[in-house]
């Protein structure tokens, strides 16, 4: 595929009026042999939409995008491209481990985050620092043993006590990353217990995201999460049927002696 054709497709992605149109472009570019190397120059394109579209293609091809790791790490410093660059690095997997120091810096920014007053906002938006750190947690789990050097910051993110709903996802993702990377259950069980102890927690709110993440995290941990069994059992009484199924599956993995 020529550079002219690649640029034409990247512009089509950037101007597509539908998700289906974007998907067609991604599928076409992702199928080009050696596309990762060809896309590297476009990550520095003057048009940020072209750079974004290039990274979206790299996300689609996963481990085959390894040649672009160095340039993707550079894009972590670009606030407009950071989130999608981190997502691309996550799909690449262990070959993207050189990104770990940059991701640690992203976590450190979130650890220092100061809450702001969202009361005047009709639709409060998640703070970019928190969103970026949440993406970094997901990426670190893809890097295997090398990600252990990020454990101190992941534990700190899991231990954040900031009264903003947005931080809840970060805490859960960080705790899940600690478990995935090290097999340490303490942080994950503590975070899950904090959510379950909240008077506002209810399996009826399963689709709010935090409830779903909490249940899935506990199921992943299994027996080391036994201390939360009574709370999950009580939750079964007022949960919708679809959520009861997920709760029952989680309890079965945690309470193996039953």
Image: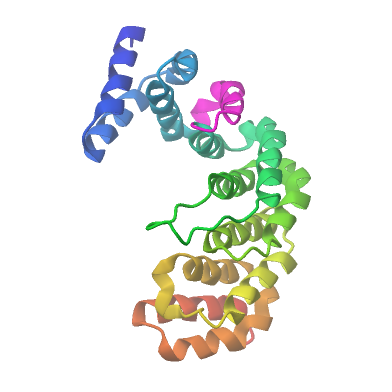
What range is drawn magenta here?
63-80
Q: Look at the magenta stretch and give its main secondary structure.
A: helix
Q: Is residue 255 visible?
A: no
The quadrant the N terminus occupies is top left
Residue 90: horizontal and vertical position, in percent? 55, 40
Furthest residue to the front?
120
Residue for point 56% across, 63% down: 164
Residue 195 occupies quadrant: bottom right
Q: Residue, x 53% and y 64% (percent of image)?
A: 165
* Picture residue at 66% right of the left edge, 60% below the top: 175
Color style of the picture: rainbow
Q: Residue at 71%, 45% (x, y): give it.
A: 108
Q: In the figure, 94 relative to 193: above or below?
A: above
- Figure quadrant of residue 61: top left
In depth, the one of 104 and 177 nearer the eye is 104
Where is residue 257 drawn, in percent x and y? 64, 86
Q: Viewer-proximal residue, 216 or 75? A: 75
Quarter of the rendering occupied by the C terminus: bottom right
Q: Is residue 79 visible?
A: yes
Instruction: Say which of 176 and 167 sits in front.
Output: 167
Examine the rendered structure and indicate whether residue 214 appears above or below residue 6: below
Query: Is 250 contained in the magenta span?
Result: no
Which quarter of the picture shows residue 55? top left
Q: Is residue 189 above or below residue 46?
A: below
User: Could you tell whether 194 is left or right of 209 in the image?
Assistant: right
Percent of width and height locating residue 171:
62, 60
Q: Is 73 colored magenta in this rendering?
A: yes
């Amino acid at each position: 595929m020529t550079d002219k054709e690649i640029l034409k497709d990247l512009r089509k992605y950037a101007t597509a009026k539908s998700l289906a149109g974007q998907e067609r472009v991604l599928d076409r570019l992702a199928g080009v042999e050696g596309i990762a190397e060809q896309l590297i120059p476009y990550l520095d394109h003057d048009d940020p939409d072209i750079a974004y579209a290039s990274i979206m293609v790299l996300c689609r091809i996963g481990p085959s995008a390894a040649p672009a790791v160095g340039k993707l790490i550079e894009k972590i410093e670009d606030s407009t491209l950071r989130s999608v660059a981190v997502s691309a690095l996550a799909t690449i997997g262990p070959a993207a481990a050189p990104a770990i120091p940059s991701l640690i810096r992203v976590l450190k920014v979130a650890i220092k985050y100061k809450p702001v007053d969202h009361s005047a906002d009709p639709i409060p938006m998640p703070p970019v620092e928190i969103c970026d750190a949440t993406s970094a947690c997901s990426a670190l789990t893809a890097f295997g043993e090398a990600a252990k050097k990020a454990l101190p910051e992941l534990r700190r993110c899991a231990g954040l006590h900031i009264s903003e709903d947005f931080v809840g996802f970060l805490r859960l993702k960080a705790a899940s990353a600690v478990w995935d990377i090290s097999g340490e259950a303490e942080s994950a069980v503590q975070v899950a217990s904090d959510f379950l102890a909240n008077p506002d927690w209810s399996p009826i709110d399963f689709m709010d995201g935090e409830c779903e993440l909490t249940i899935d995290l506990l199921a992943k941990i299994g027996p080391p999460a036994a201390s939360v069994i009574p709370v999950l059992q009580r939750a079964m009484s007022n949960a919708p049927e679809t959520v009861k199924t997920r709760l029952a599956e989680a309890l079965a993995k945690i309470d193996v002696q039953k």
